[in-house]
Amino acid sequence: MKPNYKPIESESKLIKSVIEANKKDFHYPWHYHPEFELTYILNGHGVRYVGNSIGNFFDDDLVLLGSNLPHCWIENMEQEQPPCGITTYLKEEFMDKIWIESYEFQDITTLLKSSGKGIKFDISLATKLKPKFLDLLRQPPLERLILILQILQELAQSSQFHYLCENDFLYDLNSTNNLRINTIYQYIQKHYREKITLTEISSQVHMSEESFSRFFSKVMKKPFFEFLNEYKINLGCKLLIETDKQISEICYTSGFESVPFFYRQFKKFKNCQPKQYRINYQKAIS
């Protein structure tokens, strides 16, 4: 495993748009690259890690990532087919100094500057732009440039979005840290239904409990157990959306041992109760 810098082969192109439809292309470990990344999930679902945020992704998930913002998408293991998405990479120098200072590009410039936080766009805006994303794969270079500028302009002028990270995620681009974070992700994914102790998780990366706690809080900008609870809550959200299971069953399936604690954590991370979350989602898709 080489979980650090991901090279993007784009030759001399400002823009590279690719379809990612197999496990090798889609599931790349926790990584970063200097290019801006705009990812549209055509189909599939799983967990999205961006900076210190965790979220679920589904069909028509649209996210813009800033330069060197660490991220990875991990598909649901129950899926027979890996997710399929269109990923567009924009070179870090995509916005030339002349463009950046031009009135015509001020909205796009602001958008790209904000992308260091990771930007998730609403599904209604994503589906509206879907034909243009599909078109990116077919257009010759100049037309593709014009089309991506149109897409970015629409995104920049929209209020249908939220930031994935509370603040710009400043990260020490270090291969050792990347390897540790990937190991932690993989352990959580396999053992979230069990009682994970600080002793167990720190031993996975060969650190003392105290050193691990400092390391994790420094890199992820939040304590480990807050991160773990957020992971479990996002699994709960997925079950609320995809099933009609009772909330108590979802609580235990997501790895929580207490229904009251599940409710408190859900309110903390989603700012509503599980039942209301399910109702809100059903309203949104209808």
Image: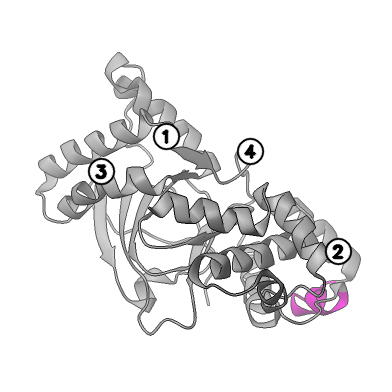
- Please report whichever mark, 4 or 2, sits nearer to the chain's N-terminal start: 4
Q: Pointer 1: residues within 10 angstroms few (<14), some, or many (20+)?
A: many
Q: Nearer the viewer, mark 4 or mark 2?
A: 4
Q: Which residues are magenta?
A: 199-207
Element under disc 2? helix
Q: Amino acid at mark 1?
A: Leu
- Please report whichever mark, 2 or 3, sits nearer to the chain's N-terminal start: 3
Residue placed under numbered mark 1 in the picture = 112
Element under disc 3? loop
Residue placed under numbered mark 4 in the picture = 167
- In this view of the protein, can residue 70 be seen by the observer? no
Residue 82 is covered by the magenta coloring: no
Q: Amino acid at mark 4?
A: Asn
Q: Measure the alpha-carbon separation of dots 3 and 1.
A: 15 Å
Residue placed under numbered mark 3 in the picture = 14
Q: Are marks 4 and 2 in contact (CB under 8 Å)?
A: no
Q: Measure the alpha-carbon separation of dots 4 and 2.
A: 24 Å
Residue drawn at 32 percent across, 76 percent down:
22
Element under disc 4? loop
Q: Nearer the viewer, mark 3 or mark 4?
A: 4
Q: Measure the alpha-carbon separation of dots 4 and 1.
A: 14 Å
Q: Are marks 3 and 4 in contact (CB under 8 Å)?
A: no
Q: Pointer 3: residues within 10 angstroms few (<14), some, or many (20+)?
A: some
- Please report whichever mark, 3 or 4, sits nearer to the chain's N-terminal start: 3
